[in-house]
Image: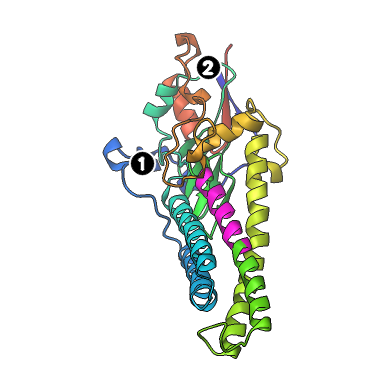
Amino acid sequence: MMITPVHRFRDIERKPEYLQPEKCVPPPSHASLGTMWFIRDGCGIACAVVTWMLVFYADFVVLLVMLVPSRDYVYSVINGTLFNTLAFLALASHFRAMLTDPGAVPKGNATKEFIESLQLKPGQVVYKCPKCCSIKPDRAHHCSVCKRCIRKMDHHCPWVNNCVGENNQKYFVLFTMYIALISLHALIMVGFHFLYCFEEDWTKCSSFSPPTTVILLILLCFEALLFLIFTSVMFGTQVHSICTDETGIERLKNQKPTWEKISGWEGMKLAFGGAFSLGWFNPFSNLNCKSPVPAEAAAAAPASAIMTQEEIEQFLSQDVAVQVLHE
């Protein structure tokens, strides 16, 4: 058996400190895996806070400027309940997308013990990330913000301060959908409120002065229109990625699929955790439908096909992919 280097451009950082096996720290124990996932990135945290503030601003204008002063009690109750329900679901989806591990590969698992446990088969290619010292599963990419390799990473979104990956794509899709819905709802209510104020006395159609009312409504209209366009596009691209089983990064790189595609409705069921149900729209439901077991966790290979200690050490000292060949 021998090892030959395979040329690989993805996520290679040729710095000596990343190439030393002794720098690889073993992955954390199972006892530490229950800690909350949160990315300490200043820009991402600021964007997440701004997102919540914009939703609260929209709720303030909808309730106190348009619905509370309205003389139609039924109209106010129905629209107030609908808008606040959608806003709550949007923020809950944002919360889950932000605090859910998107599919991070255990950091520092490029160790002799882990390589031996893989029992690689002839012809199998494995990749070592020199940045986080991890063995990369297929379709994993390194995120420079999260500082981890993420399985099926689509992109890093500052608005949720997290990567969108295998484990939290459902919550991100729900977030964009609910934001688009409340933006559309707000635009419709703003239009009706302007018509109502033109027909009635401006001093009676709002609790605020006419100039203040106009400014608040215009700002809400601009915010709702902007986010309706943005989140609708994001929602469409995410559903398309799920249905074609191709992440945003893979599409940008025009990467040829080396995996068995799970497209269409089956891809939606895999991303949303099972057969179609109301749970698809629930940001509090957990995913219970996992991806197929990767090749790295496949059954043990014959003894003659397993890497020797010398070959493992050679792999750990390289910053490129290696392919196991059988002589």
Q: Is residue 46 above or below residue 91?
A: below
Q: CA distance from mark 1 to mark 2?
A: 25 Å
Q: Residues within 10 Å of mark 2 (few under 14, many from 20)?
A: many
Farthest left residue?
Answer: 31
Say which quadrant the N terminus sits in: top right
Q: Is residue 69 above or below residue 138?
A: below
Between 117 and 239, the residue placed more toward the observer is: 239
Q: Tell me where residue 99 appears, x and y as whole percent.
A: 41, 51
Element at badge 2?
loop
Between 271 and 121, the residue placed more toward the observer is: 271
Q: Is residue 23 left or right of residue 187?
A: left
Which residues fall within the magenta stretch? 170-184
- In the image, is residue 171 part of the stretch drawn in magenta? yes
Residue 204, quarter of picture: bottom right
Q: Give the residue pinned by disc 2.
A: 121
The residue drawn where x is 47% and y is 50% is 97
